[in-house]
Image (tube, grey):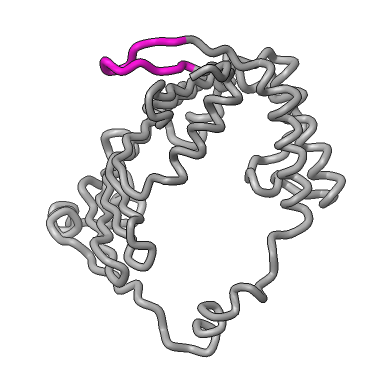
């Protein structure tokens, strides 16, 4: 109780707390509004929304279970259930009409009812092959992650220590009647450019001509990050009692 509650300390405790969790529910949502043509050229609209809700249970590592629903806008949604280690169930809830036109489907009603009223079962059990047996018994001999990935991870760790942590602002608030620490990261355009440019430079040293940053999977663009990402704000809400992350949100404007 006498340790100063800094953003670094709270985030470390949150990481430790979540390592001990084996089951829980989640509710993830993403809403993006673009002010230019970046989204409309891909999705036909400047608004893009994703909702992901469900639960996961890893209390038995040999038999993980999960169930979740995914919605991409109001036009496309599906459910996935994994009640045991060998079977996966998939069901479509809604399919956008333009997809049928694109595929040249004429009997839309029949296909829609077939897709939305039936669960598809997928057997995920493995084959008893030599390769599978090696994977199960020879993991200690398997290759470790690449030196490029290790180098990027070291750069990311340095950026977190030297640039991101000092920029974090923490306050105490109430969220759903629980006392939480609100940790906010609101980088200036200069800081955002420095973070992205550092990752790009390191990636180009390790792999000249690469199109993405290893580990993170971020595309390498010629423009400054601040030219196409504006008003980036990242909020993390950590419970003051048990240090579980209760909510996280990201907002930004894409140019």
* Residues in magenta, as a range: 172-182
Q: In the image, 143: left or right of 209?
A: left
Q: Residue furthest front?
A: 2
**What residue lies at 82% left-to-right and 41% top-to-bottom?**
202
Q: Is residue 182 above or below residue 23?
A: above
Q: Residue 217: x percent and y percent?
A: 63, 45
Q: Nearer the viewer, residue 75 or 198?
A: 198
Question: Where residue 153 appears, x then y in whole percent?
Answer: 71, 44
Residue 179 lies in what quarter of the image?
Answer: top left
Position of 122 with respect to 30 (left or right) is left
Which x, y percent locates residue 105?
Answer: 26, 57
Left or right placement of residue 176 versus residue 182 in this view: left
Question: Eyeballing the image, is 229 above or below 50?
Answer: above
The kind of secondary structure the magenta stretch mainly shows is strand
Which image quadrant for residue 84?
Answer: bottom left
Q: Quadrant of residue 193?
A: top right
- The residue drawn where x is 23% and y is 61% is 83
Residue at point 31%, 56% (across, down)? 104
Residue 237 visible somewhere in the drawing:
yes
User: How many numbered discs sit on the rendered protein?
Assistant: 0
Is residue 46 in view? no
Residue drawn where x is 76% and y is 33% of the image: 158
Q: Nearer the viewer, residue 110 or 12?
A: 12
Task: Answer whether residue 96 is magenta in the image.
Answer: no
């Amino acid at each position: 109780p006498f340790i100063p509650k800094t953003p670094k300390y709270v985030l470390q405790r949150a990481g430790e707390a979540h390592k001990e969790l084996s089951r829980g529910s989640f509710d993830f949502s993403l809403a993006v509004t673009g002010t230019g043509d970046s989204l409309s050229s891909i999705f036909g609209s400047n608004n893009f929304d994703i909702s992901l809700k469900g639960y996961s249970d890893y209390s038995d590592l040999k038999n993980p279970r999960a169930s979740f629903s995914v919605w991409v806008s109001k036009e496309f949604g599906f459910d996935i259930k994994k009640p045991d280690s060998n079977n996966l169930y998939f069901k479509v809830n809604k399919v956008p009409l333009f997809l049928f036109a694109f595929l040249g489907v004429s009997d839309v009603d029949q296909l829609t009812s077939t897709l939305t009223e039936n669960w598809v079962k997928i057997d995920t059990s493995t084959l008893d092959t030599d390769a599978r047996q090696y994977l199960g018994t020879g993991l200690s001999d398997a290759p470790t992650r690449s030196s490029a990935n290790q180098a990027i991870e070291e750069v990311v760790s340095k950026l977190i220590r030297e640039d991101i942590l000092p920029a974090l602002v923490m306050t105490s608030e109430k969220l759903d009647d629980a006392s939480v620490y609100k940790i906010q990261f609101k980088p200036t355009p200069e800081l955002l450019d420095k973070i992205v440019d550092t990752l790009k430079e390191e990636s180009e040293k390790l792999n000249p001509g690469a199109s993405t940053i290893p580990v993170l999977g971020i595309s390498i663009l010629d423009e400054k990050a601040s030219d196409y990402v504006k008003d980036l704000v990242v909020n993390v809400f950590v419970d003051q009692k048990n240090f579980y992350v209760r909510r996280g949100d990201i907002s930004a404007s894409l140019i």
